[in-house]
Amino acid sequence: MNRTVAGVILALLCSASTSLFAQIPTAPPWHDIEVTLTSGNGEIRVSDRITLDGRERFRFGLAHWLEIEALSVDGVGASVTRQDGGYLVELPDSGRHQLDFKLRGTVPPRDAGQGRDAGMLASSGDDGVYLPAYDAWIPDEGGASIRYRLKVGIAATRRAVATAKLIDEKVDGGRYQASFEQSHAGEAPSLFTGPYQVRERLVDGLRLRTYFHAELAELSDIYLDAANAYIQRYRRQIGDYPYADFHVISAPLPVGLGFPNLTYVGRRVIPLPFMRGRSLAHEVLHNWWGNGVAVDYASGNWAEGLTTFMADYALERDKSAAAARSMRIKWLRDYAALPPGRDLPVRAFRSRRHQASQVIGYDKVAFIFHMLTREIGRPAFDAGLRRFWNWHKYRGAGWRDLQAAFEAAAGRDLGWFFRQWLDRPGAPRISIGAHSLTRVDEGFRLDVEIIQPIAGYRFGLPVLLTTDDGFERHEIRVSETLTRVEWITSARPRSIHFDPDNDVFRLLRKSETPPILRDITLDPAATAMIGAGNEEFAGVARALAAGLMDVEARFAELALDRTIERPLLLITTTDRLHQQLAQLGLQQPAGLPAAEYSAAAWTARLANGVPILVVSADNVAELRALLRPLPHYGGQSYVLFETGRARDRGIWPVKRGALFLEFD
């Protein structure tokens, strides 16, 4: 999930798990916070009374746009010193102490050019103020857990919401005031304000709210219905919802972010159907995985993949087996597009910073949970989830804790499973070796060799065997580099297909996957060439290339021929396209739909197998209209646009692949 582009819904961003400062005691401090915000100019005043004990010094970080007006320790004026990029306060002893901070500053304006870090940095504007915990708008001990009470005062035309239970609210003397409380240890507060219209629904004591800008208010009931449905779904599957409320907030920023008890979504994204579908489900589920049970980032991030599996994938599975299979195939295609140098072990994934990390931390991990479900069965898998929740709610947990919960539910050791999928990069490569079909007294004997050249993987491999009498489903166990299998059938075999529904995470061969946009955009060796002389067009093309590439875009002078050896991104005008394709030995694909379009992006492979991505547009305006939407179609082989709206998209057809045999 690029955090700066509307339409990409990101899941929970990890709080800092490694501090710049020395390790602190585990007893969580109590913060009593009061905030006064001035709408329009971003002026803010913060008082924070911190009660803590068990330490002789207090080390903290603070946003650069805040200054400390006053500080007292136990009612006596005190000073701070700079240390290790943060601040240090010396305390009289290791007993209980009360620190009173008075802070003031101006929240940075929205147009300050935050780029990819928009979700991590505080910002303000007429349409809302965003104060994420990540930006240390209160004294922050490197992401340490705290408990707090937060009081907020803003103009009566505004509303405020925070990542804690709403205690009370009122409008008094032209000011809106609200109080929030987090009584259990958790992350520091994030605070959101804006000219919101609030809609509320109470369900069995649970408060559901939307905080929407005026133009979105009519969507409130739809979102409240959907949020309640997802909460009830996961409550039945996992355990009680861990918070007192859940809010959906429309964001002035082009982001989609998950926080404890709320989701913060770009106001342009809120109206889109996919947001109130699996994207909202994803954000709701993060209240169990990532918030209710925090991630032990030192051992890797399991929460994004588990949430993807139980939300995004499960909703596709609810539609049909074919829809679930399509998602698995997409994950395998995206992984096949990942250059080996950008692969990494699952345990090394912490958070999404680019498309490559999503392929591992979201997609591969979700696929692993799919395989685990097949390995131990759905009842044991669901029981393992409930054990994990009951054992670790309101605490942190890592991969070993998940493994222990599933082992307890399944009643057997699963160390081999987690080691092979989490501790090494890569994936099995499976192919069919020697095979024969012979007549025997019982009918026909089919002998097939399964080859996996990379040793150390163990998995169940589904098989679909088709005969003159119909089809048979089997599953064989693969654990060696060479596995020989034999079937005796009374009817003549017509075909055999290993892994027919793509249930095994494996590296697809080129014959099994068509070229997609990510074949080029994920590859740091890819080169971008601009095929138009118009300087304005070229400037937009450079911006588009920068947005498409998952790494820094590499540009080269236009020099097209059939011997290009690096993946190529060609951005050109429609009127020059035919001539430039001829230089590459290509033609526009015959498989493109016969539709009217003003811009197109499609993929192909040159005669030498090098992938190419061609982007063409009728003019500068049509190319500029691709800046926002095109980066979201990395899993497609082609996309056709009309004034920035996708008219058609698809995947080039492929043959059945290397694991299919047909008998004469």
Image: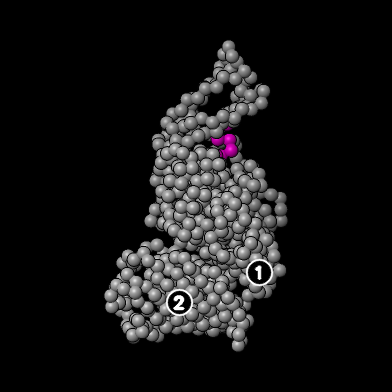
Start-end of magenta stretch? 497-504
As drawn, 95 above or below 102: above
Kindly identify the amino acid type of the residue bearing the numbered disc 2: Asp
Left/right placement of residue 73 relative to residue 385 reads left
Q: Are marks 1 and 2 in contact (CB under 8 Å)?
A: no
Q: Is residue 607 magenta?
A: no
Is tag 1's residue or tag 2's residue first in the polypeptide sequence? 2
Picture coordinates of residue 102, whole percent (x, y): 42, 83
Q: Residue 424, located in which quarter of the rendered image?
A: top left
Residue at 51% in and 82% down: 36
Q: Residues within 10 Å of mark 1 (few under 14, many from 20)?
A: some
Distance Cα–Cα, label 1 vs label 2: 27 Å
Where is mark 1, residue-wise? Answer: 200
Kind of element beneath mark 2: strand
Residue at 40% in and 67% down: 28
Instruction: Tell me the quarter of the image containing the C terminus.
Output: top right
- Magenta span: helix, strand or loop, mainly? loop
As drawn, 465 above or below 106: above
Picture coordinates of residue 66, whole percent (x, y): 43, 80
Where is mark 2, residue-wise? Answer: 32
Q: Is residue 500 magenta?
A: yes
Question: Mark number for residue 604?
Answer: none
Picture coordinates of residue 468, whole percent (x, y): 66, 22
**Is 529 or 578 nearer to us in this picture?**
529
Picture coordinates of residue 41, whole percent (x, y): 53, 84
- Inspect this view and state whether residue 441 appears: yes
Scheme of colours in the image: one colour
Kindly identify the amino acid type of the residue bearing the numbered disc 1: Glu
**Is 356 or 88 nearer to us in this picture?**
88
